[in-house]
Image (cartoon, rainbow, N blue to C red):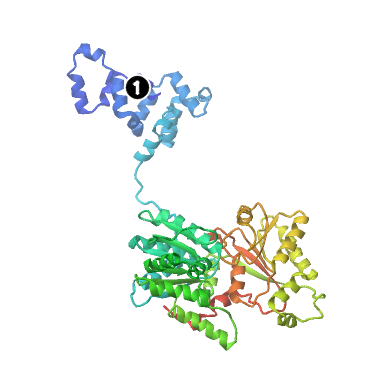
Amino acid sequence: MLREILRNFSTSDCFELLSEKQQRFYNELSLEQRESFDLSNVVYENLGIMLLSDKKICTKIVGRLRPEQLKQAFANLSIDADELTKPYQTMEEIIDNDPSDFIKALNVFDDYASVLVSTSPMKSTTQVEPEYPLYPYQIDCSQRIRSLIKDNTANRAMLHLPTGAGKTRTAINIICDFLRVNPEALVIWLADTRELCDQALAEFRKAWKVLGNQSMPSYAYYGDSELSISGISRGFFVAGLQKLNAMNNNDKVILQILYQQLKKHTSLVVFDEAHKAIAPTYKNTVESFIQQSLNNAFLLGLSATPGRVMTDDIKLQDENKRLSAFFNNNKVAMRIKGYNSPIEYLVEKKYLAKANFIRLDYDDIELSAFTISERRSEGNAELLKALSINSNRNSKIIDTIQLELANENAQIIVFACTVDHADELSMILAGSGIACRKIDGNTPSILRAAAVSDYRRRKIRVLINYGVLTAGFDAPCTDVAIIARPTASLVQYSQMAGRAMRGQRSGGNLSCRVYTVNDNIPEFRSVCHAFAHWDSMWSEE
């Protein structure tokens, strides 16, 4: 439409829009040449959209519009020109109020939209958001870890952040920084569950696309992976501890040789859930990677609970001290002033949800002949079995789930006593028409993945599990955890409670509820207490 409007311009109108050089060229033409010379087309081809960036020219364009062109211009804006008393004046007001509408009116917006954006006035200040960001406390921790890695005298450290505070993201950021500086290095990530391995691999692949500076291989060596480790000397290698141990115990000479080569190339070892690192088999694996590395490999442990257990038992206290010593007493944790614990800070800043810990009491008629301590003396398996078949206990769990389901937005994770217990609870719920799934270590991977996916997408409301979702599982939608599996392990309890504690700034909730079935077995319901318990056993970096 703009080209047609320019044909309404007089020769002098067009001449004024030419450059001095173009005007000289036109003046040197003969009268005969001028008669056949399309001056309006010269203006259009030379200035085009630039004509619409000048308010005076736009006003002149309005004045040169024929009535039918003006009517069409308003139609392009879904305005009926016949209802306007002063249509030309209205179009000039459009130029003043919203120049982009004037461009639309002339039906050139689609053709020149990208040009208009690129030629719009430059903004002096623009906020650029990162695609793989860290929170301030994560940045501080990662910088302190990097300093330790660069220090030749310190080759081990533990990163201690509460459940839900982003240990994996912080560690992956450290790894990406390490691989940018050392592109030929090999980073080994060790974990003992498929969930932890999957999480680490997915996070690295996501982060490197943003933070990486060149192509970098990543490897999955866990679960049913058939990866050959031949020739692997650089990149990011996620390994299941069980799979590595199986290789180490294999009698085939070639596998032993390849395994030794892998260790020699390693420059950085990350041990997820590092409170398990001093278990004899795991400890031997980690030590072999550190000692046989030709690159002075650094060991980074990750844990929300940097101790094995909370107990008055001297022997087990010694075990906690051995864990601290294993990481050279280097613990890097949050440094938050003015708060009694990091948890308080994380909740206040909405990184973590504010947890309401609720105790579930039930009438223990069926177990009245045996005290809990007597059942425990028969063995933990017998105790769990006895609890799992207690009808009063199960009724309390089901009633609590149904109470929470009355809240349309509630997403519930249940930690069952046994596999059979998970089966029974899911049967009861499904039989009453509730959308729920159950998973355990024996659930086929395809069903397991589908259940987790459906839960994250809120296609099901309840996810019942035994032994698989305590760590390495992230579903920020979760706002209710029901801990029906008794434990004297502070580590395990914190992990289970933490599944519901993702905060609003992490895609989760402002608050959450953590129900703990009261079996008169020692339990730990204070996550703040859990976080601070081991501090006296570590020297802060």
Which picture quadrant has residue 434?
Answer: bottom right
Q: Residues within 10 Å of mark 1 (few under 14, many from 20)?
A: some
> In the image, is 90 to the left or to the right of 433?
left
Q: Position of residue 133 (x, y in %)?
A: 44, 59
Q: Position of residue 244 (x, y in %)?
A: 49, 67
Residue 315 shows up from this direction: yes
Please state which amino acid type lies under the numbered disc 1. Answer: Leu
- Asked which secondary structure carries label 1, the reply is helix
> In the image, is 438 to the left or to the right of 366?
left
Which picture quadrant has residue 217?
Answer: bottom left
Label 1 sits on residue: 6
Nearest to the observer: residue 408 or residue 97 = 408
Which picture quadrant has residue 421?
Answer: bottom right
> In the image, is 188 to the left or to the right of 422?
left
Which quadrant: the C terminus?
A: bottom left
Nearest to the observer: residue 387 or residue 336 = 387
Residue 518 shows up from this direction: no
Nearest to the observer: residue 348 or residue 223 = 223
Tell me: residue 11, above or below residue 323. Answer: above
Q: Position of residue 84 (x, y in %)?
A: 51, 25
In the rendered image, the residue lying farthest to the bottom is 314
In the rendered image, the residue lying farthest to the front is 252
> Could you tell me which residue is drawn at 40 percent across and 23 percent down?
1
Q: Position of residue 454 (x, y in %)?
A: 63, 53
Nearest to the observer: residue 93 or residue 349 = 349
In the rendered image, the residue lying farthest to the left is 28
Tell me: residue 36, above or below residue 449. Answer: above
